[in-house]
Image: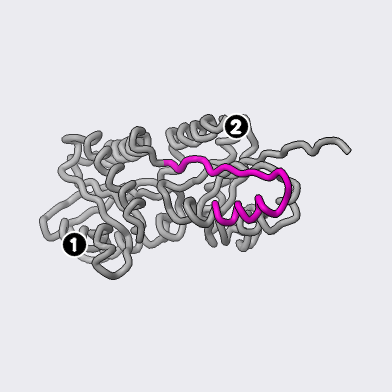
Amino acid sequence: MGKRLKVRKYFLVDNGSFGAQAIINLRKIANSLAKSSGFEVRPMGLMHSHKVNPSALDGVAGESMEAFLDSEEANFVSDIRVVPFFLGPSLAVTDWLPRNLEKWRLGGKGRSFVILDYLFDPEDKRLARILEDLSLGEIQSRNLSAPHLILVDHGTPLPEVNLVREEVGKQLKDLMGNRIAGFSTCCMERRAGPEYDFNDPLLQDLLKKLEKNCAHEVLLAQLFLSPGRHAGKNGDLAKICGGFETQPSQLRIHRLPTMGNHPLMLDILVDRIGRDR
């Protein structure tokens, strides 16, 4: 019997979603990454994505690492390369993936896996440059004059994940310079307790404060990669901002697009695969 060929597979993995919008968006990015890198890249949610009705996904079923690692197909793969579509070191990247991939590795002979770097690199300003480009595009299209710029993330129980928001925020503030009247970071939601105060302020509280201080124009830069339950058209962030639009208010809030489809994001992902060669 001949030697078994080593079959390597690349997976672009995000947290997973029950929403079709995020799954379809990840597919587009994976397709672009495959064309740019020269490797087949399969889009996968960490969990959940395989549970979405295919009729909402152009007839093509969603996929997740959760389902794949338990599938018969996983027995015919010997080398898994995960490209994390995560901004920072969330537990998905540092705990769930290595733990479950190790179980898969131990389930057969000659198996190996590598989890490539997540998107944030303190020496690389491309994430901030994406947000700068999106901000300047909105300023130009809306003819805004020195708006207040907010960078919002989901909120996290992990200080090391919060650090990504703060570091990208510092870079973005420096890049924008005097083209904005002020700059703030905040989160969409957070856990209760003083041990999670590093997330503060909440977006809703920050907007109230800006309104009280007579701010007029606010740019909301979303530290989110894909539209979905939080950053989608009718998501949580839209509802928070909508609360100010449906009441008498001088505050006008301009939400920027999510970051994942920007050309510089594709550059970052290609670099991640390039480091692995």
Q: x, y (%) of residue 39?
A: 63, 33
Q: Is residue 135 left or right of residue 93?
A: left
Looking at the image, which residue sits at the far left? 213
Tags 1 and 2 in contact by the CB under 8 Å rule? Answer: no
What span is in magenta? 98-119
Is residue 181 visible to us here? yes
Circle number at residue 208: 1
Q: CA distance from mark 1 to mark 2?
A: 45 Å
Q: x, y (%) of residue 120?
A: 39, 41
Q: Is residue 214 left or right of residue 36?
A: left
| Amino acid type of the residue that numbered disc 2 sits on in the rendered structure | Lys
Circle number at residue 35: 2
Is residue 62 visible to us here? no
Image quarter (top left, top right, bottom left or bottom right) of the C terminus: top right
Q: Residue at x 27, y 47 (%)?
A: 166
Look at the picture and state if 121 lies above or below 251.
above
Q: Quadrant of residue 273?
A: top right
Q: Is residue 258 left or right of residue 132?
A: right
Image quarter (top left, top right, bottom left or bottom right) of the N terminus: top right
